[in-house]
Every structure is written in structure tokens, then in C-alpha cells.
Amino acid sequence: MKAARLFSYDKPLKVVDVEAPRIKNPSEVLVRVTGAGVCHTDLHIEEGVWREKVQVTLPYTLGHENAGVVQEVGDAVASFKKGEKVIVHPVITDGTCRPCRIGEDMHCENLVFPGITADGGFAEVLRTSERSLVRIHDLAPDDVAPLADAGLTAIRAVKKAASRTTSGSHIVVMGVGGLGHIALQLLRCMTNAVIIAADVAESKLRLAEKMGAHRVVDARRDPVKQVMDITANRGADVVIDLVGNDLTLANGMKMLHKGGTLIIVGYGGTLSVKAIDVIFSEFSVLGSLVGNWDELRELMELTRQGKVRVITQKGKLDEVNDILEQLKKGTLEGRGVVIP
Amino acid sequence: MKAARLFSYDKPLKVVDVEAPRIKNPSEVLVRVTGAGVCHTDLHIEEGVWREKVQVTLPYTLGHENAGVVQEVGDAVASFKKGEKVIVHPVITDGTCRPCRIGEDMHCENLVFPGITADGGFAEVLRTSERSLVRIHDLAPDDVAPLADAGLTAIRAVKKAASRTTSGSHIVVMGVGGLGHIALQLLRCMTNAVIIAADVAESKLRLAEKMGAHRVVDARRDPVKQVMDITANRGADVVIDLVGNDLTLANGMKMLHKGGTLIIVGYGGTLSVKAIDVIFSEFSVLGSLVGNWDELRELMELTRQGKVRVITQKGKLDEVNDILEQLKKGTLEGRGVVIP
Amino acid sequence: MKAARLFSYDKPLKVVDVEAPRIKNPSEVLVRVTGAGVCHTDLHIEEGVWREKVQVTLPYTLGHENAGVVQEVGDAVASFKKGEKVIVHPVITDGTCRPCRIGEDMHCENLVFPGITADGGFAEVLRTSERSLVRIHDLAPDDVAPLADAGLTAIRAVKKAASRTTSGSHIVVMGVGGLGHIALQLLRCMTNAVIIAADVAESKLRLAEKMGAHRVVDARRDPVKQVMDITANRGADVVIDLVGNDLTLANGMKMLHKGGTLIIVGYGGTLSVKAIDVIFSEFSVLGSLVGNWDELRELMELTRQGKVRVITQKGKLDEVNDILEQLKKGTLEGRGVVIP
Amino acid sequence: MKAARLFSYDKPLKVVDVEAPRIKNPSEVLVRVTGAGVCHTDLHIEEGVWREKVQVTLPYTLGHENAGVVQEVGDAVASFKKGEKVIVHPVITDGTCRPCRIGEDMHCENLVFPGITADGGFAEVLRTSERSLVRIHDLAPDDVAPLADAGLTAIRAVKKAASRTTSGSHIVVMGVGGLGHIALQLLRCMTNAVIIAADVAESKLRLAEKMGAHRVVDARRDPVKQVMDITANRGADVVIDLVGNDLTLANGMKMLHKGGTLIIVGYGGTLSVKAIDVIFSEFSVLGSLVGNWDELRELMELTRQGKVRVITQKGKLDEVNDILEQLKKGTLEGRGVVIP
């Protein structure tokens, strides 16, 4: 089968022929991928950012936002059968460790992350496990694929934000790209907060308004001051930083109200804060990862209810490098999806 | 009356005669102070650390850990009367803003902090408000005074730790001084975690063992490695940093398990973390302030139950500078208390 | 001033001249009532249902859903001044007991309930306290008055429902009257559940659809079976019983899914359940009272956001008995409001 | 192998020879039972109480509180191997439905309950699944077996109680038998409440004191009044009813404080409450089932820490009817355990 693989860091992917995966243990499932989202993390992997975080041998197939159709199931798989349309939770988990048993799959002690630590979904067929599947019923795999990671990361951050705010609170979303435009829609249906979107591109601010932001902030012009003005000098209750560079992290802290929370989702930069500032205003800083299985189920439910819609730019598998290039330049609206 | 006041930064307090406070509005209360704890924050105030955080004009009376006897109540005070023994919540709050209405007094929008932003309790009489009082019944004011701030800060941090752990989790307490020796006792009665205490002084480690630590770590010798060894390389679920210098903050992050939480209570240093690290392991960093009124009530209840006992070094009001000096040198065991 | 007062049980109210209330203690406030909602509880009081629950001497003024304009404030009142438009939380609380200190005003140990245990708002002027006021800014008192009790009771029940469900859960609302039509709107903005409304009147089912119910159930025709059909025999996750007679309570239990919750708001009937049934399916039964201050604040915020609108039938003070009559017959759509 | 089986309702069990179970699907495990607790539910099953709740064909083997040694594992079992000492969670769950995925195993949509709906552990070998096992390390299976159900039910009720109380709250435990004596120990290490135990037998009250009750109440002499006296007429914050007959349920409601919670664990009787009472005091009534996997893990941790110890009366498999008889008469102290 064809697959888009990373052969060396700082080089584009190559679309090559590889052997299709086979089921190796009874709880595995093969999914014919009919939609695979392209993510900033794919860029970061190319750039070698993840090299010290995970162990993986090149070459391997990227792609960790996958949806498609069940092609084959292992002998122990009881809850899915061939032909069902599914979205694929990005990680394979053991189901027996404590984190798995309390529903926090992402903290599984034996986690495998196809597309990051193993062969992923920029390929015709993906090997995953029964525990990673969520039915999508009448939704289209290529429409929902980006929800498997971008959306799933957004919903987890939004749920953290929701649990720390009340009706009328102010929530800032920094970065209106693949994650941001989904986060805004989720904030609209999961909170009754005032939603402020910040970005450096005019087109992204217009997108933010369409996706539900009540207010937008041009991040090129003193975003801290703008947020202070919007909040009558109170500051925001929660900032969700989907960018994560030094500047956005520092600004995020500065625009918080007493008791406020900075949720970090984007990465690349470093957060530097004085202990006295964190204590004096009792700030919280929360890292936020991709969501768990139930959050993916919930996201599919909200999509079915028409409350979430991903803006996608679809292409063929061999267009993956073009899409990555646009993503790098920041010219991609919404999320790129390849259809292997 | 006599009061120990700060006349200039970087100089010792002076014990001088000042006019006793009078009730100015109907919800105020005068408390005859019979125990006032001496805190690291008093040192930090002397050093000018708080100068940019709060607005206050010198000279003024320090002392924010107070207990004593109600001497006079304003006309609108219904729940306390003259002669009752009380511990004094460190802040005066308006009772009408949203934070006050949901019980988070410390985030009051009109907060006054006697001993930090107004005259405090290193004096014969303290002016406070009805909302700041908690009855202590048969406990002695000079025994419990340090619970008004050191204890109240400890219980809030411990409750945050408790809510993020389960039986068998590992919790590290860095710093076994005034706060630490109370935090250890609270962890024993509020969690079923394995409690690890770290300090740089041998005597503090012995104290930690007496106060309930299951394991102690000599922080002079690679505390991260020691915690990793104790936890079978898993790392701690929560670290409570009561020291808060650059090194303890950095070490705190390094000894966390996936999904772990660093609770910052001590201050002075700066925390610097890469966004990718925070996200990859979904860490949380929580500033923790002094607790709310109900946490002070709870702390008095636990003290009455015999589960919490403060180790105190008592002195007269004019010995306050000596106590501050010992605190600076780290030679004070437990908490200093002056009896005005 | 004129006031509608209860002189004897099982008789209509009489509109008579009484002396206007005066401020008796410094935290009190006089509110000129410009909207007072008429509630089923007023009927129940007339019928003597509350006689054994509370101690009150006839005659007294009913009316516990009040909004208007601040007319005079006591000396200790700092957060409101004459002329401000306010909605009045239905109870007067002491602000110092533990329930008040943790935000659960309704459980205040020294609670006074104007309109139930003291003179209420079917009068030109109402005496209440600073703690009971919430600003309504540009909303009209006669439009929002029913939110002070009907709405506040609805939001508390809805928040309990929200905390026990997830996106896609099924929530049944029994009774689409004054509370019900608000509860439906709140469920739409505070949950992503499938909302099912049940009532015995065709007109109420049409109202339910307008207010946001996804499905309606004619309660005259085996509502349990209908809910089972709608939920594919799963049963509902939460039932909010706003009627509370023997039949609705029994049916509520029967239509619950495993782990489900019956929230009781309406009253009059008796719930009878076998212990084995409660345990086997781990059901919860929650009484739900009128909400706390912060819930009233939140409700005003949602109203300002345009997400909640009360349907009102407005009348003059001396029309109160007519409105009560219509309420009794079930012919009143939405909520009756008198304008004293 | 030998097994104690129910051949007809209202008759004692018969110990007979049956074929040993074999592994039928790859996630199953065979456990050699070396301790099986005897439970009130076994009596209730004999009496036919469960006949209408579950579908099962006689004869079958009872015993749902099992511990022992792993004898054989299926091909898909990765986290346990032959020879490990384990306690067996009482139910077999599918691991893929939503309740399983969020950790609420007991609400599994495809739950099998060996000893109630399938062959249980009053036998030499029990068939269960990987998901049902918890390691016990150096604990003895015949000492901990009753924790698999009696203890697991107790910890779930105690955790519900803990989450609804604070230090100094009053919690009443009704019934100091198999569950009660464990619940008392758990309340001591999981709360800082005042613990009141009620029972009709003098010996049980003495046991309660040994197990940690602060106060005991002879339930033959107006227990409601006694609880009111102990709580200064405030009432209890939580009542855990481990008996569940008409009288204890009615008394439980009567001894609650405003906002209080009745947790029902015992069964047999019927709860009857007026809606107005439930609402007026905002009471909650919670059914409580056996706990989930993580609660069993936590219980083993607390046992290892020495905080929980089951009092057991051990016998051979063919003594099971004698033990059931003592249980019926109420003469058994602690929990009966058979060692097949």
C-alpha cells in the first residue's frame, strides 16, 4: 500500500510503497483510512522537536488524526465489526493500568501513539486497537478526521476551561487555526462565557467571528491591553494558549484575572513566571493533552448535533507535503486532510 | 498600646507606642491579641519583596497570624460577642462580591490584609471584621495563632493535593519549617498517600518523621533521584513546594509523574518550564494562597480533634526581631509566636 | 401602602392598606417592588400545605418573587445604592453561618423567607437585605421577577442535571409551567443533552417545543413507555419532576436508566421506592430547592445574553387572586406577575 | 471439583461435584479460590429476593466475594500471570461500553455477576476476566476475600459520604455487621467526621467502638432522638443505611440535617418520603452499589497500609450453610469466609 513516511528529519515526507499492516494480537483492528488530518505536530516531528521526547526509528509513517472504515478485527474484538465507519482515538492503550481504568487513557502506562511512536494513518491502512475506536454513524470520515486530534485536544482544553468558569466569565483563545476554530465552537456550546479570540492574521480574526468568538483581538497590537479593555481591567478567567511560544505564554499570564488559569496546548516556547506572581494571584497553569476516549465520543455527539464543524482543505496522500508547507506559512484555513 | 512596626525597609521592626484602633464601621471587631505568629512573609516585607505587589505607607504594624479575645464588636455584629476566644482569618473581606459569595474570600475584590496592607497583630489590639473570626473554644490563642496563616496556607495546599491524589499516591513536601510541619500532619489525616518530606537540614528531616512523613529526602543530595528511587522511577503525583526558590521549583517539576501537579506556596524564585514538557506529561502548576474562612474553621476542628499541633517558640512582643533573625537563619524549629 | 395579604387559610388574599416597612438594622434594604411573580407555592400556602413546615402568624403579605428598585439602604450597606434596579433573592440570610460562608445561602441557619415566613413582595415596598440583591442593569423588573424563584429553582435543578449528564444524555422535564418553560431554556444553554418534555396539556407541549425541547411526551398516555421508546429502551439519565405528585414521582423512577437521577422540585405527593431498586440500579433521588445568590447572578447573566426569557402574564396587585385562580386551573401560560 | 450450589429457592446449598470451568475466550482467567466470603446477598438469593431482578437458571454456584491465586490465563491476558495472588472484582465487564470507559464498571452494559447471575466462587476454581483482578501482593486471600464485595460496597458508600461532608460533620452508620465494621474503619481513614454507629445488638456496639466509632447508639431505643442529642439537635449530615428495612430507612430520613444525604446500601424494605420534605430540606437519597475496579485497588492499598482489617470467621466449603444460618440469626461477628 502507499504511505507518506518520514525518512530523515528536516526533509519532506516521501510517499512510498510499504507492506500493509496485519493483525498481530487479538484486540487489534485494521482501519482503511479515508481521512487523515495534517497537524502542526507533524511539522514539529519533521523538525525533530519530538526526537528527545519519544523513541522511534526512521523511516516511519506519520498521521495521527485518522478516520475510516473497519477492515478487519482481531479474535477478541467484540464491539466492532468490518464495515463500520469509525474515528480513531490517536493512542493505543492497554486498558488494564490504573489510568486506563479510571478513563484517563492518555496517561496509559503502556501507550503507543501511531503517527508519532509507530506507523500512523498517512497510509491506506492503519493498525490500531478496539479500545481506540468510536463509531461515527452517518458522519463522513474525511470531514471528521481532524477531530481525532485537533478536535480532541480542543475539547479537553475547553472542558478544563468550562470547569473553571461560570456564565459571564471571560475566556481568551490564542490562535485561530486548526484547533482554534474548533475550540471556539466548543466554547459556544459548552460554556456561557464571553469568548475572546486572538490571532496575528486578519483572516483568522474573521474566521474567529464566524466560529463564535464574541470579541476578537489583533495580537500584533498589545493583546494584553486589549483584553484588559474588554474585561474592564479585570482580566480573563481563562486563557487557552494554542500557540505556545515565549510571547503568547508570557502574555497569557499577564492577561489573567486573580484566580485565573492558563491552559497550555500549543508548544515551542518556554514559560517563565515568578513564584510570587503565581501565588499572589493564585494562578493555575495547566498543560493539556489530547482527550480521552469519552471526550472523543462526546465530540462526535456534538458534531452529530451540528454544533461542531471542521473547516477542511482536502487533498490526496501525495499532496501531504504541500499541505504541511501551507501549515508552516500559516496560510491554511482550518485543517488539512489527506485522503489515502 | 505597644506595637512592632516597620519604619523602613531592610531595617528591624521598632516596638513603639501607638494609639489603639477604634471601631470605624458597624461590622468591625476589635480583638485583644494574645498570640501573633511570625512568618517568612514578615521577613519578605522587611526586605521589600512585597513593595511592588501592594500599596502601603510606612510605618505600619506587621503581624498577620493572630488569635486572641474579642474586646469590642460593632453594631452590626451579631455572631460574636465580647470575651469569646477567636482565631483571626488574615484578611478582611467585603462579603458581597462574587468571590466572597462563593466562599473564596481570598479573592475578594475589596480585600484588606492587616499586617501586609494595613496595621496588623504585632500589637495589643487588632481591628478586624466579624467575617474574619473563627471561634476556638477551649484552644489557647498563643498555641493556635500560627494556624491563622501558616496553617491556613498549609491546609489549602493539602486540600488541593488531596483532591488530585488517591490512596497510595506519592506526595512530596519540600521544606519542613513553619508550614511544612503542619502540612505533614494534615496530609496524614486528609490523605492516604505516601508522604515524602525533603529539607536541607538534618534536624528538619527528624522533625518531618515525627510529624508523619513516611520517607525523608536530604535535599542537599540530588532530591530528584531520591524521589525517583522511592517511587520506583514513577515520580511523585504531587509536589508541594514550600520553599519556592529557583532550584526547588525546577526540581519539583523534574520529580513529577505524568499528570502530576506542582503546588507552589513558597516564593522568591522563578519557575521556568518548556511548554512541550508541560503538555507532554500534562502537568499542572498551581499557585496556592492562604485558605478561606471555611478552611480555617476546618483547621480548628482538626486541631480540636488532636490531629494538628503547631510547634511554637513563644516570646514577648519586643523579642520579635530576635525571632525574625532566627527564622532568617533557619534555626527556628516550628513557628515563632509573640504574645503582645 | 397597598399589600395583598393572607388573612385565613383556604380563602383568597385581601388587598389592604398597611404601614410601609422601615429599615430596622444596618444591613437592610427597602426595595420598591415593580414586579412580583405569582407561584404555585402561593397556592400551597393558601391551602395550608406549609402550615406545619414554617411558623408564621396570619395575616401577612405573600409574594416571594420580587424585583424592583432600591428605595433606601441601611448604614452598613456598601454595595448598593438608591435607584439601582435589582432582583431580590427570595431569602434573607445571616452571612456568617457555615452554609452562608460556603455559598449555600439556602441552608442558612437563620434564614428568613419573605412571602413565606415574613411579609413579602405583593406590596409596594419590600424589606430585604443587602445580601439578597442582584443588579439587573438594563433588564426590566416586571420581566425578570419570576426568575427570583421559579427561574432560580429551575437553574439549580438544571445545574444538578448538567453535572450528572454528558453530551447526548437524555433529560426529562415533567411539567411545562412557570418553572418548566424556564428549565427547558436553561437545559438548552447549559447542557448538550437530548431534552424531553412531558405534560398533560397539549398547549404546554407546544410551548415546550418553542422553549427548546427536542421531544415531547403526552403524559396522559403512558409517559414511561414513551420515554423508553425515545431512548431506545435505555431510559433517561435524569428526570426533573416539576410536578411532584404520587404519579409523576413513581413514573419518574420507572423511566430512569441505571445510575440515573430523579430530581424532585414539585411537591404534594409521596415517593415510595423499594431499597433494592434504588441499590440495584444505583439511582439517586435529589430534592432541589431554590438556588443560591450566585445562581441568581448567573441566571441574570444568561437572561442578559438572551438565552432565557420568561413568558409572563402581567396584572395589577388587585388581580392577584385571578392569577392564582388561573394557576390552579392550569390555564396560565408561563408565569403571572403583579405590578404593585 | 467441589462447589456449593443452589438447587432450589428456600433450601440450603448443596456441596456437590461439578466440572471445573475452562477458559472460553482469550480475556478470561481461572482463579483457584482460596477464600470466598459469605454475604447477606447469598441469603437473599436463597430466599428468592433476586429472582425478579436477574435471570439465572438453577442449579448454580453462589459466592461473589472471592480471592485466590491465578491458575490459568487466556491468550489476550497481558497484565497477570499464573501464580499471582489476587482479589476478584465481583463482576465481569466488557471494557468497551461507555460506563466501563469512564471507570464505572458496575454500570457496564454487558455485566455478568458470578455468584449471582453465573457460577461463583463457592468452588475450587472460578472463571473470571483479566479486568476483574487486583493484585494483593503479600496479603492472604482468605483474609481479604470479604473486601471483594462487603468491603468494596463499604468503600463506595464511604467515598460518597466523604465527598458530602467536611471535618467535624456527623456520619451515622446503621448496622455493624460484615459491611459496617469495615465502613467504620474506612470512615476513620477517609474522613475527619464524627462517626456514630447504630445497631440493635450490644455486642455490635462494642465492636463498633473497637472499629473506630466515636459514638454508638442502641437502635432499640429511639435512635433518632439519640442522634439528635449527639448532634445538638442539628441532625446528621450523612446516614449510611447498611440494614435497609422500612424502619431504618424511615429513621434515616428523620435524623438528617438540612442538606443531608441518606445512602442506602442494605435492602429489603421500602423508603417512603413526602416530596415536600425532600425539597424543604434539600435531602438527597443515594443508592450505593458495589464499587468499581479502582475502588477495589484503593481498598487493597488501605489494607496494606494497615488501616482496614476484616474480622473473619473461617470455615470449609461444606460449612457454608452453617455460616449462612449464623448470618441469618445475626450471631456472626464480622464476615464468614469459606476456604474451598
Image: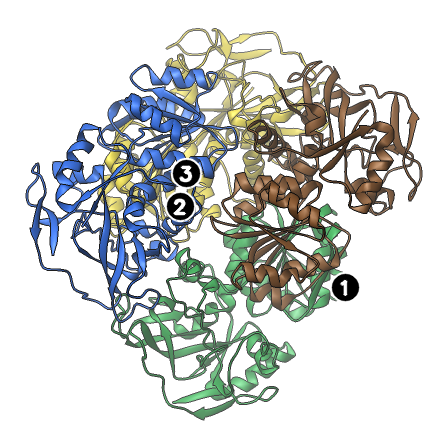
Chain colours: A yellow, B blue, C green, D brown
Disc marking residue B303: 2
Q: Name the mark nearer the viewer: 3 or 2.
A: 2
Q: Chain of mark 2?
A: B
Picture quadrant where residue C245 is located: bottom right
Q: Is residue B257 left or right of residue B252?
A: right
Q: Is residue B299 left or right of residue C53?
A: left
Mark 3 touches mark 1? (CB < 8 Å): no
Helix, strand or loop status at disc 2: helix
Q: Is residue C201 visible?
A: yes
Residue D215 location (% of width, % of height): 57, 51
Q: Quadrant of the C terminus of chain D?
A: top right
Residue tagged 1: C221
Residue type (three-letter) at the residue carrying disc 2 = Thr
Residue tagged 3: B186
- Label 3 to label 1: alpha-carbon separation: 57 Å
- Label 1 to label 2: alpha-carbon separation: 60 Å
Picture quadrant where residue A90 is located: top right
